[in-house]
Every structure is written in C-alpha cells, then in structure tokens.
Image (tube, helix red, strand yellow):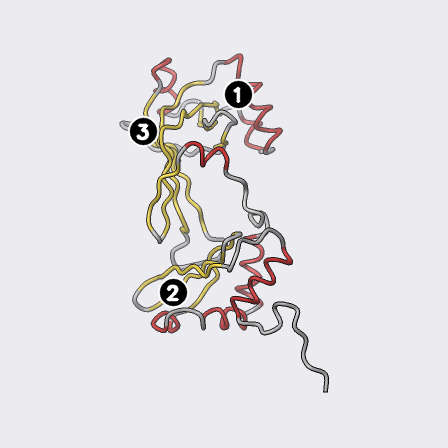
Amino acid sequence: MLVADGVAPATTPIHHLLPGGSFAVSLLAHSPLAVCTRAAGTEGVAAVLELTDFAPLPLREPVRSLVWIRGRVHSVPAHAVRTMVDMIATDHPNAALLDIGAGQVLLLLEVESVVVADAGGAETVNAHELMTAEPDPFCELESAWLCHLDSDHPEVLERLAGKLPAPLRRGRVRPLGLDRYGLRLRVEGADGDHDVRLPFGEPVADVPGLGRAIRLLMGCPFVNGLRARRM
C-alpha cells in the first residue's frame, strides 16, 4: 500500500527496488494519489510504502512483519517509462508490468528511511544495508517448506517445541519463518500468540546445510555424521 496525507491509501501491484536505491511503484492512473503526484510536479508528494509480509500458513494472526519505506513519490517522465519497465522486467518479470500505460501509471519513490517491524520490535535499515542485502538462499522454497513441515511432520514440530521455554509448550506450535539464520515458530496459546526464533549455530547456505541445522535444533545424535555402533 502507498499512503499519503489527504488521500486514500492505494494498492501498488509493482514495488521494485531499483539500482539507485529508489522504488518503482505502480498505481491506478486515475487514483487520487497518482493525480496528486502529477500535480505536484518536481516537488513530489510525501508518502509511505507499506509492505506486509503474510505467513504462508492459516494462522490466527497471519502478518509476520511490516516494512515502512518513507520518502517522496514522483511521476516518471513519459520518455523514461519504457526503459524503467524493461529494467524491472529483466530483474523480475511481473505480469503487472503489462498494465503500465493501460490503466496503471509508474511512479518513483525516492527513499528517505526504511523501518522493519515484527514481533521482536522495530529496526531502522539504512540505505547501504538496503542496497547491499542479498536474497536469503531459502526465500523461494520457504513457503512450501513451512507448509510441508506443518502438515506432514508433527513429530519434528514436537521435538522443536521441546526447545521452547516451558510456559510456551502448552500452546499450539506452528512453523512461522525460515531463513539462513534460523527457524521461527508461532505459539498460539490461550494467552495470545508468541513468536520465538530458534537460531542455527551458524548461518546456512544450502539445503544439505539446512537439514543439518534442523537436526541440530532437534537434538539428533547423528547430525555430524556419527553412525550407530555395529553389534
């Protein structure tokens, strides 16, 4: 969602980080915010892009985290639209790009600040961190893996739940997130929801490393290649 004072929030089918540190966003061409941006000319309009991260599982509270990107939004000159669309399509093909110029307009959000918030609190991310961040190695398989763990491996969740503080073991434990640094669990209890991170001993970069890290969290005795003694 793109939010600005005095106009209704607008959905953004495209929100793409560009090499220069700005975000390309798309809006309905006749939306109040798009009209205000065109009228503002080179001054632009102060706005906040809000990104909502939803869990892939049907949880009581589906939102995992929020990102707020504050800055000024400007119209993209007509002669630059096609070049920008081609650049976005090269990096991340998106069917919504086909609507640019056919009901949707492309805008540019010049970033002034970024804040990321989850159950653990809120944190500011500076421009250098934003531009140098690498995609997590498991970002494309995370959703499928969490759904598989939730539906097919209750025994794994039970072992992982044993690592939680005792008061949290009475709730329903669901897999919430996965990244190179650890696994996040959501405990849905009678007193509310609690998010807990189980960190890996060290960052992992591939699927075999992920398997070893999960077995370590579970307390598997053969995680380091040990073999049962032959009798």
Q: Amino acid at mark 3?
A: Ala
Which residue does the image show at 53% across and 72% down from the upper left? 219
Picture quadrant where residue 188 is located: bottom left
Please give the label number shown on residue 4. Answer: 3
Q: Nearer the viewer, mark 1 or mark 2?
A: 2
Please give the label number shown on residue 188. Answer: 2
Q: Quadrant of the C terminus?
A: bottom right
* Cα distance in 3D space between marks 3 and 1: 23 Å
Helix, strand or loop under label 2: strand
> Which residue of the protein is positioned furthest toward the right in this rendering?
231
Q: Nearer the viewer, mark 3 or mark 1?
A: 3
Which residue does the image show at 39% across and 16% down from the upper left? 38
Does residue 106 lie above or below 206 as drawn?
above
208 horizontally vs 47: left or right: right
Q: Disc 1, disc 2: CB below 8 Å?
A: no
* Cα distance in 3D space between marks 2 and 3: 35 Å
Does residue 223 lie above or below 127 as drawn?
below
Q: How many marks?
A: 3
Q: Earlier in the sequence, mark 2 or mark 3?
A: 3
Please give the label number shown on residue 101. Answer: 1
Q: Amino acid at mark 2?
A: Glu
Q: Would you call the spot at circle 2 few (<14 residues within 10 Å), some (14-19), or many (20 or more)?
A: many
**Where is residue 3 shown, x and y percent of the image?**
34, 32
Q: Amino acid at mark 1?
A: Gly
Q: Earlier in the sequence, mark 1 or mark 2?
A: 1
Q: Quadrant of the N terminus?
A: top left
195 horizontally vs 106: left or right: left
Which residue does the image show at 40% across and 48% down from the upper left? 65
Taking depth in this image into account, of 133 and 25 the one nearest to the observer is: 133
Taking depth in this image into account, of 72 and 100 the one nearest to the observer is: 72
Q: Disc 3, disc 1: CB below 8 Å?
A: no
